[in-house]
Image (cartoon, rainbow, N blue to C red):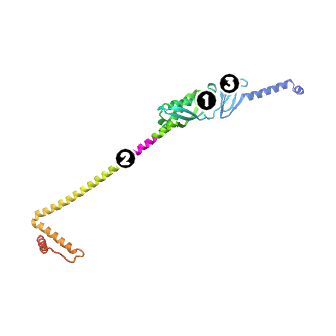
Amino acid sequence: MEQLIETLGGGGIATLLFAAFIIICIYKGVRIVPQSEKHVVERFGRLRTVLGPGINFIVPFLDRVAHQISILERQLPNASQDAITADNVLVQVETSVFYRITEPEKTVYRIRDVDAAIATTVAGIVRAEIGKMELDEVQANRSALISTIKSSVEEAVDAWGIEVTRAEILDVNLDQATRDAMLQQLNAERERRAQVTRSEGERRAVELQADAELYAAEQAAKARRVQADAEAYATGVVARAIQDNGLEAAQYQVALKQVEALNGLGASEGSNTVVLPANAVDAFGDAFKMLKGRT
């Protein structure tokens, strides 16, 4: 060692020390920050600057990297808290929150335990928001409730340099007594709806039966009216014929009817004997005379 010192001499040692100092300054003054991190730099215990991803330079021996903060998105452990709705129903709400640190200089100097602080804030906001709603509204408007909780949490943690990226309500559980009561209510509602459906069906059947009877009565009345009109028309024709031609027209019609009846009797199958009334020949004769007279 003594020989090395003698060989280098005073000037060589000084040069070696200066080179070592330069290397140490470079090591302490150059900071390479990963893409997923931000570094908080202090000078004599006070905030100096925040280093972003890439190559950064600080003053050696004066500045130091006090905190290395990850800016990746984080998820809080799933939390479960009790809440009472506006209609006095005790529910157990399971929530999950995702966040990321955007301003580490606020986070490291304003809050000690970030996860615990956010979890406490979320629990208070969830209880407050559910307390404004009834149970049915909590179940039906879960999306709106999640949006309200997320915006409220964002406002509360903004001073800590934190951005809430997602907030989820995973489940809303009820105690067993409330579940039993809701089940009974559900069964009663189903029975009521079934009874209403049966009553409506019976009423509809009665209405259809009444409509059918009314339609049948209307059709029968129309048929009787048509038949009466036909009979009235035939009577009117006969009356006009009698009025125009006198009694001979009536006798002519009677004679024709007698002839048609005799023809039908003779034309019937299995009839070997024809029975003629005593005045049948006279009826034929009268009919031919009237026909000849009319022509």
Which circle, 3 or 2, is nearer the viewer? 2
Lateral position of residue 19 relative to residue 99, left or right = right
Q: Residue at x 20, y 73 (%)?
A: 265
Q: Residue 42 carries which label?
A: 3
SS for dot 1: helix
Residue position for label 2: 200
Q: Position of residue 42 (x, y in %)?
A: 68, 24
Magenta: main secondary structure equals helix
Residue 146 appears left or right of 35: left
The residue lying toward the viewer, choosing from 235 and 24, is 235
What is the C-alpha distance between the residues marked 3 and 2? Answer: 80 Å
Residue 42 against residue 95 in the figure, above or below = above
Question: Does residue 16 appear in this view?
Answer: yes
Of labels 3 and 2, earlier in sequence is: 3
The residue indicated by pointer 1 is 116
Magenta region, residue range = 186-200
Give, as a three-letter code, the residue at label 3.
Glu
In this view, 195 is above or below 87: below
In the image, residue 190 lies in the stretch drawn in magenta: yes
